[in-house]
Image: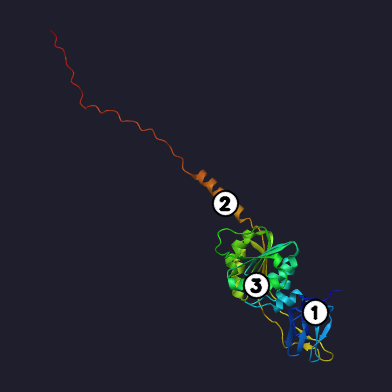
Amino acid sequence: MAKIKNNSPVLFFYNNSKKWLTKISKKESFHTHIGIIKHSDAIGKEYGSRLMTNKDKYVYLLQPTMYDYVMKIQHGTQIVYPKDIGYIIARAGIGDGQKILEIGTGSGSLTSFVASVVKPRGHVYTFDVDENFMKIAEKNIKKAGVSKYVTQHNLDLKTAKKMPLDEMDMAIIDLGDPWVVIPQVRQMLKGSGTMFAICPTMNQLEKLTMALVENEFTDIESTEHIIRNIEAREGKTRHSFQGIGHTTYLCFARKAFFGREARRSAEAAKVSDSSKKTAPKIVKKTITKPAKKTSGKTPKRTSKKSA
């Protein structure tokens, strides 16, 4: 039986649109439109219990999940929503012990979720160039309780001369121009390693796909994921008028070896061989000196007179 203590994380749940994620502190009170919630009243209660406010409204004391952390984190940038994160994790087969490369930390929502899946033996190495976003992400990752499994790097991989990692199991790219870092990602992935890129527009998908083919990736798949909420109530169940529609497009691919390098080497060797065979032979000519010219006149014959 899990009981709430001082410093325990709690989700005060009133309804689907009114819920608050906090850490219990016995000296604090939480003021809401449904009344005041005293933190000290939650201490010692079991998760799942309900607590009355001073306005006779009740909230449930729920144990937060990673979904709750992601949806409640501070947004420095557009976050990747759980509906997309879930597919990324399932499609790429992310699991305990894997080494994950992330380019574009953003607010750290995806970073935190993936870290919670690869822990305790795995690790997420995340790269960003904006120090302000990195500070926000650091707070969110810490709040989610996964700091131990994440290493943040302030480095622009687009211009890096040497890649800092290798043999990564999976790479996640969240940039406006993901195609630019595909050669770098290839260097850091292991053979058959997977890659996901987050692309808000279809034009990005087109450019990215071309870069993936050029850099020898296969099993390329682009998808969009939309969730429709249903309000289920007796006698009047219907679709919800609120919901999360389009958020982003996802592009998946795997590192492969097309054999281009081997073909290039073979072709180069063939051309070299061919040029040797067709090269003209150099024949050495012996130069002979011309004989000295003699006079064309016939010498006069002298006759001896008879005595």
Q: CA distance from mark 3 to mark 2?
A: 50 Å
Location of residue 119 in the rendering, given as x and y in whole percent from the top left corner: 75, 65
Q: Residue at x 74, y 82 (%)?
A: 28
Closer to the camera: disc 2 or disc 1? 1
Q: Residue at x 69, y 60 (%)?
A: 192
Q: CA distance from mark 1 to mark 3?
A: 24 Å
- In this picture the colour scheme is rainbow
- Whichever of callouts 2 and 1 sits on the residue coming sooner in the sequence is 1
Q: Amino acid at mark 2?
A: Glu
Q: Which residue is mark 1?
A: 62
Classed neighbour count for the residue bearing mark 2: other residues with Cα under 10 Å, few (<14), some (14–19), many (≥20): few
- Of helix, strand and loop, which one carries label 2? helix
Q: Residue at x 65, y 62 (%)?
A: 217
Location of residue 113 in the rendering, given as x and y in whole percent from the top left corner: 72, 71
Q: Residue at x 51, y 44 (%)?
A: 276
> Does 102 appear above or below 260?
below
Quarter of the image with the C terminus in it: top left
Q: Which residue is mark 3?
A: 137
Location of residue 126 in the rendering, given as x and y in whole percent from the top left corner: 64, 66
Can the viewer see residue 40 in this picture? yes
- Whichever of callouts 3 and 2 sits on the residue coming sooner in the sequence is 3
Q: Amino acid at mark 1?
A: Leu
Can the viewer see residue 94 in this picture? no
